[in-house]
Image: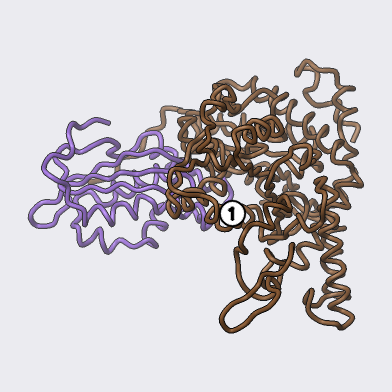
Amino acid sequence: MANEEDLYQEHILDHYEDPFHRGHLAAATHAHEDKNPLCGDVIRIELKLDDQGLIEDLWFSGDGCVISQASASMLLEELQGKTAREAMQFSAEDMLKLYGPRLTPNRQKCCLLSWRVLQSAIHSPVSESAGTGSSA
Amino acid sequence: MSSTTDTNLESAGLEATDRKGALLDPALRNDFPIFGTEIAGGLPLVFLDSAASTQRPAAVIDAISHVYQHDYANVHRGIHTLSERSTELYEQAREKVRAFIGAERAHEVLFTQGTTGSINCIARSWGDANLHAGDEILLTVMEHHSNLVPWQQTAKRTGARLRHLPLTGDGQLDLETLDGLLSERTRLVAFTAVSNVLGTINPVAEMVHRAHAAGAVVLVDAAQSVPHMRTDVRQWNADFVAFSGHKMLGPSGVGVLYGKESLLDAMPPFLGGGSMIDQVRLDGFTPAELPAKFEAGTPPIVPAIGMSAAIDYLNRIGIDSIGTHEQALTRYAYEQMQAIDGLRILGPTPEHRAGLVSFAFEQVHAHEFAQVLNDRFGIAVRAGHHCTQPLHAQLGITASTRASFYLYNTLEEVDQLIEGIRTVQAMFAPQGRKRRKRRP
């Protein structure tokens, strides 16, 4: 099993401290939020799908450990500009591979939180009134 | 281990000799085979998670093994030799528990699956028979989920209303509000003797007295107190007391429900099945006498016998000495942690606290503490909400890190914990890192 030097590789800490698209998306067409019941880590993902099913933009917000927050940043960076179909085909295994270091089953839940939220968000259109402002 | 004097005792501002005098002989660690286990990359184990579940001495492990090798059969059934031996050991375990908690009668001690099983038994049996719409159940905001959820379920079934005793700013129960919350509608008051997160020691006897004055029945969750301090259920005058074997050096899968005879006699059985009956016809049954009435099915025979061996071990060391030892470790840990910038210690000062310290640090999530303490220091701590989500919400945090102590922990281990905390803080301090931009 990986020790903590590997778990917290520099590029992961970089994502944690300088995340990709952390904030809200005023023009979001789809959004979802969920928690890891084990520890209370929370992630919200807001995204804008165009008529062709292309992910034009996507942002995340939330609170939690390095793994849950850095993995969200890595996932969004990976999927920006991809199609919703490609996002749906992006498997849990792909997510763990993208993160990199091997994780124990409990820490995998931290890593897969944003992946789970994204999969739900694609199927969760927001109502007209939802989503205002955009900030990091 | 004369090196205890080499720790940071002086900086803690207390005399090293006083502290040493309060501590147990660290040679007792040799009684626990688990301390021969190495963690991540060959580190010796520093086990600071006893509030979740303790380790076991060889005496308990051997007692369990011995029963299976020499004495095991089902209890209260056969007339063959092994059944008689098993039954005798099982009933001796009940007597051992009775004496350990100061109960009057052995049949007031019921074996369950654990504290959760004990509380659910009260909720289902006593609760369903005695609670009605408009009645009130008084809990506290520091309860473990196991003393919240069963009552939420009971309230839904019966129409009873839940109320909660609040906390003071330093994490004790706000007893000034107690009399205002108690009324003739209060049928049950259920609370923990020691908080599993804050460490707060609650004044059980006083609370029982005031609850009784309002006419309420009282349940005490003693899972975090029985293993660490002398228990006298008659001095408490509690109606029901619940605790677990695995938090007091015993096996998992066994717990105790103590209840006053008159209340247990008046309650309907909870689980139905073998053992709990006197007569069964095709159209009905008559229940057995106590304690069998509440022990349907094959009980946790070997776990109960293992728990009995654990009580023997605790008695040999002395429960008061164990409490004093934990106090010394906790005070030392608390003082060291207070000196760490930005660390928020949850709960009251050491004189009001049992053997655990939970903390939160705004910039670093509890998971990082638990991970790095394990991987780099071999230290086992608990990270998360510790089955107290409402308490964490009250404290304005989602997770915390908890170090809990028992008779086998040492001052050196506290020093390692403190060094570990400082290391984690440095590791995750903002450093102006920049994510490498991907090529478009």
- Disc 1 residue crowd, few under 14, some 14–19, many 20+, Cα 10 Å: some
The residue at the point 47 percent across, 53 percent down is B153
* Relative height, residue B311 to residue B62 (above, below): above
Residue indicated by mark 1: B126
Q: Depth check: give the residue in front, A82 or B216.
A: B216
Q: Taking A48 as reference, is A36 left or right?
A: right
* Residue B311, horizontal then vertical, whole percent: 84, 52
- Write down the quadrant of residue B387 in the picture: top right
Q: The brown chain is which one?
A: B
The residue at the point 53 percent across, 35 percent down is B184
Q: The purple chain is which one?
A: A
Amino acid found under the numbered disc labelled 1: Trp
- Write down the quadrant of residue A86 in the picture: bottom left
Circle count: 1
The residue at the point 15 percent across, 47 percent down is A29
Q: Depth check: give the residue in front, B322 or B291.
A: B291
